[in-house]
Every structure is written in C-alpha cells, then in structure tokens.
Amino acid sequence: MVALGHVLLALVAAPLLPGLINRVKSVFAGRRGPPVLQLYFDLAKLLRKGAVYSRTTTWVFRTSPLVGVAAPLLALVLVPAGGAAALVAFPGDLLLMAYALALARFFLVLAALDTGSSFEGMGASREVAFSALAEPAFLLALAAMARQAHSPSLTDALGAPTALSDLGLLPLLLLVATALLLVLLVENARVPVDDPNTHLELTMIHEVLILDYSGPDLALALYGASLKLWLFSAILSDVLLAGLPGDVWLRGAAHLTGIIAIAGVVGVVESCMARLRMVRVPHLLIAAGAFALLALCVGVR
C-alpha cells in the first residue's frame, strides 16, 4: 500500500519539486519568484495548445516524450519507499531500472538528431558524453548498496533498514549519498552542470534537446523530467534514511520529507554555485564515480 501510494504521489506531486527548487533560489536572491505550482500552470497551458512538427522529423520525434514519461514511471515502480517493498521486485531489478532510464535518454537523443538541427546535435553529443560517465557512477553506487544487503534487488538494497542499521556502515552510506547527489545534478541538468533557466546557445544541454517540442509534447517532456527528478530524489532519500527505526508509515513519511529536503538542497546548490565550465563537468562525474567505487570497496571489506 505504501509503495502504491508513493507511485501515485509521484505522479501527482513530481512537478512540485522544480517549484520548490525555484522557491529556494528566490529566497536566496531576495525576490518573490514564481509560485511553487508554476510548472502545473505551464503544463495545463501547454496541454491546451497544438503541436507543431517539422517535415524532417519521423515517428522517433513524436515517440520520445511518451518514452520520457513511461521510463521513469517504470523505474518508480521498482524503487522502494521508506522501507516498504516496491510494487515490483525481483533479483536484478536495479539493472532494469538503470536500463529504463537509459532507454529514455536514448530516445531523447535520437529525437534531437531526428530534427536535423546541428544545434540539437551539439546538445545530444554533450548529453551522451556526460551520461557515459554518470551511468557507471550510478551503477557503482547501487552495487555498493546491493553488496551490503547481499541482494541484487532494489527492495533489499534500499528498502531493508535492519540490514543497514549498523553505525559502522555510516561511511558507506555517506559515500553513496555523495555520489548519488552528484549524479542527480548531472542527470537532471541542474547547476553546476546545466542551468534549466538559461537559453544561451553555447551552454544548454537538456533544454536544447527539447527545443523543437511544443504543446502536449513539450508538456510530456517537462513532466517526464520532473518524474526523473523525483525518482533520483527518492533513491537518495532511501539511502540517507537507511537504518531509520519505526514502522513503515513513519519511514514513508520520513522518505517523503527527505525528497522535499533534497529539492531544498538542490536549490541551495544552485543559489551558491555557478555553472562549471564544460570541460570541468567530466571531473565532477569522475569524482562521483570515485566516491561510488570507494563505497563499493568499503562494502566488500
């Protein structure tokens, strides 16, 4: 029941996270800023509009937004919530989750190339280059948790607090959490890797990939991005709250609080840091991979 509630809550509340991030940034900047529900208003406006398609695009361009929503939803079904078992759990489901996210990226990149725009091709090359470094760090972090839980299932690795309640595992959890936070910033195109509020041609990554979308397709792309942000925040929250005592409902409430807190942390990071130079982003991802690899070594030891 808790896992089903988490999936349903994610479907409804995922667009709230970008609003919370923008609210934190507005507080740091000393201005009022957009309302927390701004993305809901934007989605409603886009759904009422029509879509425009270039004659050079194919079915790939139209399919990509649907895959961008379906893939994070599939991944959410596999992720436990605050100690409760996931809706679907089996050995090796962490690989299915990772490949579902890779499938969404694959279609997003193909759709950008399908437009025939060199500008979007530039963004696609950046997306692929960074993902090649982000995915190993993500998989190593999950492998460290799975190794400690002695199970290749996400439900056991992230949803079994009794197996991770030893204070001696605190270094492992901190290393994994640091790696996942860095991967979250990269995968969701946040500062210091990308700025979702910019439209400078030479610096955009994610925004340029969806530049040719309009109407309902753009709404699906934005909604899929918010679902992906919720997913990574949920995984990070599970890691940070591993070992939390209490019943499943208390841990579920703490899990939701953790997701909101992570959105606040992202807002603080974006308020206190500038975007890195493009050539420095691989260094950040290599650091994330090093943290994850060190966590895996600690778990094996």
Image (cartoon, helix red, strand yellow):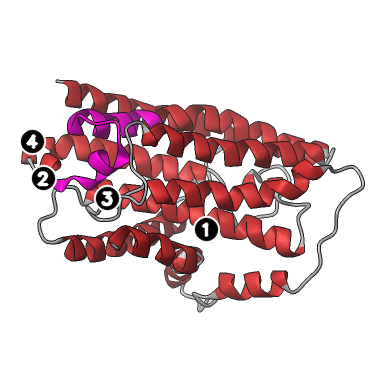
Give the labeled residue for mark 2: 162
| Residue where numbered disc 4 is placed | 168
What's the residue at 49%, 74% (across, down)? 36
Quarter of the figure that contains the C terminus: top left
Indicate which disc, 4 or 1, sits on the residue closer to the N terminus. Answer: 4
- Tell me the crowding category of disc 2: few under 14, some 14 to 19, or many 20 or more residues within 10 angstroms, Cα based: few
Percent from the top left, x then y, of residue 236? Answer: 32, 48
Q: Residue at x 29, y 31 (%)?
A: 152
Foreground tag (2 vs 3): 3
Tag 2: residue type?
Thr
Q: Report the Cα–Cα distance between label 4 and label 2.
A: 13 Å
Is 99 left, or right, of 196 in this rendering? left
Callout 1 crowding tier (Cα within 10 Å): few <14, some 14–19, many ≥20: many
Q: Which residue is mark 1?
A: 226
What kind of residue is marked 1?
Ser
Of discs 3 and 1, which sits in the foreground? 3
Q: How many marks?
A: 4
Say whether marks 1 and 2 touch (CB < 8 Å). no
Which of disc 2 and disc 4 is earlier in sequence? 2
Main secondary structure found in the magenta portion: helix
**Can the viewer see residue 122?**
yes
- Magenta span: 139-161
- Residue 165 position in % (x across, y down): 10, 44
Q: Residues within 10 Å of mark 3 (few under 14, many from 20)?
A: many
Say what amino acid the circle numbered 4 marks. Answer: Gly
